[in-house]
Image (cartoon, rainbow, N blue to C red):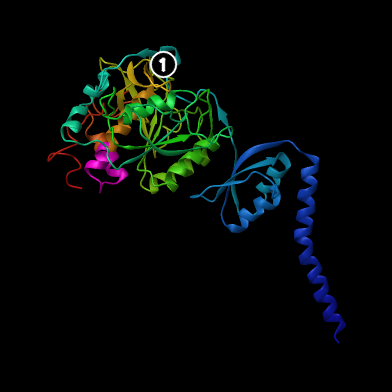
Amino acid sequence: MNFKNTKLKLTALIATLAIPLTFSLYTSSLNHTDSTTHRYLVAYSDTQGKQTIENVAGQANDIHAFNHLNMVAVNLTNDQKDLLATQTGITSIEQNTTYKSAAQAFGANIKTVNVKGNEQASWGYGTVDAQIASNDNYTGKGVKVAILDTGISAHPELNIAGGVSEVGYTQSYADDNGHGTFVAGVIGAQSNGKGLVGEAPDAQIYAVKILDSQGNGSTEDLAKGIDWAIQNHMDIVNMSIAFPEDSPVVEQVLASADQNGILLIAAAGNKGTADAATDTVQYPAKSSHVIAVAAIDDNLQRADFSSSGSEIELTAPGVDIVSTSSNGKYELRSGTSVAAPFVTGMAAILKEAYPGSTNTQIRQALDQGSIDLGATGKDNLYGNGMISFQHLLGKTSILASN
């Protein structure tokens, strides 16, 4: 027997086994020396990177894996985060951030109102020529619209096709704030003779609850909501929300949704200044993958609260609009979150009328068919202009040749 070779092989084996053992002992000591954890969104390049995350974080950790990205949400101590940052296969680590008042509508202006049977009770519907669509019997039928918001409550006017809650305190997507229910009505209040009629009354509305009862939301829950929309093959996503800061992780999810054919629409934000001299557009509307929607009043003037900036793409009615309330009645609200669903409803009509059109083609048609407001051409207040059905349906439609 060659004792020399046997000794060398045994030494190599011990060294190989020592690597995971040392890694395990090191991570174990980290967990014992620093027990305070924070929530992180960690991206990885391959299965080895994902396994590394599990090894560092521990099997008992609350790890959420995203369906369409190499990314997980995970609780980590500072030492665990620092260790992960040095490991092969880990591409980014971003702390989950929660923002207050992410829902974009003015609570102080909310008023309860009465609505007659079978009417579009706000000036906005007529302003965008919604009657053109209804006269041609387009109702958004068969189009799947995800509303990422505070959830949607049961209402006689709303037919909720399904949904999910991504917030930690409840598995119900019912609306405990009122914001999401209002947004849903602008898009999809049914034509049933009971009251309000939305812009796309037969669209399939899905409630994706990513904001809590106070309208607060986190980057993790926003990313989860978009990931759910991709997984469930939504056509359009409405985000009447605004975060003050960009998120590289959310940007990756938005890009994935865009690449999967989903049209993304968001409120520009309610941080407008009187002189509109600074860029106040908020996230996710700031993303190039998203249509940023500003608000106008019934004089077709920019609402003083409406954010401005180079990212503004379209403008829609957003002052004193009537829609569904979470108490089963109706109410009046203002905000860029009220303007965004007007664009979403119009997009749903176009998707029904031209089902072969891509999200990019519908986005271009909305831009080209808008009515120029303010300075000639695209500007920081109105973008390309106010949405209108005038050139979007029929033989002369911008989409007719697609």
Q: Position of residue 69 (x, y in %)?
A: 51, 49
Residue 275 appears in the picture as rendered: yes
Q: Within the image, what quadrant is residue 335 found in? A: top left
Q: How many numbered discs sit on the rendered protein?
A: 1
Q: Mark 1 points at which residue?
A: 273
Is 148 one of the magenta-colored residues? no
Q: In which quarter of the image is the N terminus?
A: bottom right
Disc 1 crowd rating (10 Å Cα; few below 14, some 14-19, many 20+) is some
Q: Check disc 1 and give the amino acid type.
A: Thr
Q: Position of residue 323 (x, y in %)?
A: 34, 22
Tell me which segment is drawn in magenta.
Answer: 349-364
Q: What element carries label 1?
A: loop
Residue furthest bottom in the image? 1
Task: Tell me the residue at 78%/65% (across/down).
Answer: 17
Q: Does the magenta stretch include residue 357?
A: yes
- Closest to the observer, 125 or 176: 176
* Residue under the point 68% across and 43% down: 81
Of 114 and 102, nearer the camera is 114
**Residue toward you, 104 or 367:** 104
Left or right of 5, for residue 50: left
* Magenta span: chief secondary structure: helix
Q: Is residue 309 visible?
A: no
Residue at the outermost left position: 395
Q: Residue 205: horizontal and vertical position, in percent?
A: 37, 36
Q: Residue 380, percent across and down? A: 34, 25
Residue for point 19% across, 28% down: 131
The image quadrant that residue 5 belongs to is bottom right
